[in-house]
Amino acid sequence: MPELNCKKTKKDIAEFIKSKVSESKTDGIIIGLSGGIDSTLSAYLSCEAVGRENVFGITLPSTTTPTEDKIHGVDVAKKLGIEYKEVGIDTILNEYLSVTQLDSDNLAIGNLKARIRMSIIYYFANHKNYLVCGTGNKSEILIGYFTKHGDGACDIEPIGDLYKTDVYKLSEFLNIPKDIISKPPRAGLWDNQTDEEEIGMSYDLLDQILYLRTQRDMKNTEIAEKLSISVDDVDMIIKKIIRNQHKSKVPESPKKTILDW
């Protein structure tokens, strides 16, 4: 994969954020701080772009949020010197679950948590006239590893063209705390969940597959041979891309010709 020019990337993303705030006639950026590397990097870049006084952080823990992540989310806000607020989501979540009375389903409940969080973030964004900063990276966006209308909902996606491995490189360049960089990526949507386990492979391997497929246009068999892996592993990732394309599109409608108008 090509080497990332961290200095230029930092400058380009900061200018992007600044221009979008200006174009939208908003007053700043709001970002959900999970304590993970993606939201931390996005927060650092937002402060670089519009100044810490115009960035608002919000932590939204639940009972399945690792304690370490709760601490890191607050620590990032304090280190950057931004205004922040903590809003626990368990009361809201439990109200949903008591009303629906459905059988327990980790995936459905996890997605509900993500959507509750984003609803709260947008409430604050509307109140403050701020843009919602997304925290998705290119790797996760391509395979649809996010919750539609949850963490995938945002006004801008500053690190959306950075592979996860590039996120690590830029984070190291910006001197983001090593304990945030080194811990395993996880959404904390259910107990003991980790991103790489859920995806089915390491981000390092995932990024190589994605790069060779989307930017080098290589066939699945060619990718498998080049990376010395099973073609089944490549097929698994390509199927994720195809199956989850709807998550990154505006909802589609049938054309008039199809309806025979």
Image: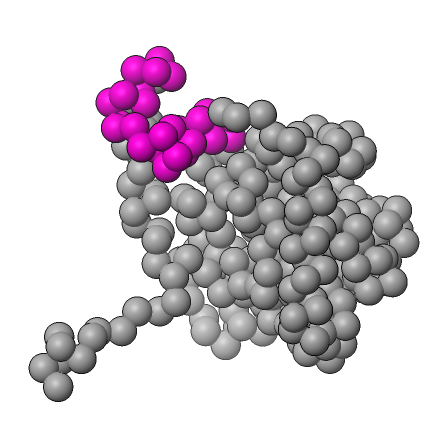
Indicate whether residue 211 is drawn in magenta. Answer: yes
Count of numbered circles in the view: 0
Q: Which residue is drawn at 29% across and 41% down?
A: 239
Q: Where is residue 251 shown, x and y percent of the image?
A: 35, 69
Q: Would residue 58 be found to the left or right of residue 226 on screen?
A: right
Q: Is residue 198 visible?
A: yes
Bounds of the magenta segment: 200-228
Could one spot residue 60 in this view of the protein?
A: no
Q: As displayed, is residue 42 above or below residue 247?
A: above
Quadrant in which the C terminus appears: bottom left
Q: Nearer the viewer, residue 35 or 136?
A: 136
Q: Indicate the position of residue 215 as horizontal and vertical percent values.
A: 39, 34
- Asked if residue 118 lies left or right of residue 60, the reply is left
| Residue 9, percent from left and from top | 66, 40
Residue at (27, 73) in percent of width and height: 253
Q: Which image quadrant for residue 236?
A: top left
Magenta segment main secondary structure: helix
205 in the magenta segment: yes
Residue shown at 36%/30% (left/top)? 216
From the viewer's perspective, is residue 185 above or below residue 65?
above
Q: Which of 115 and 1 is in front in this view?
A: 1
For the rendered model, the colour scheme is one colour
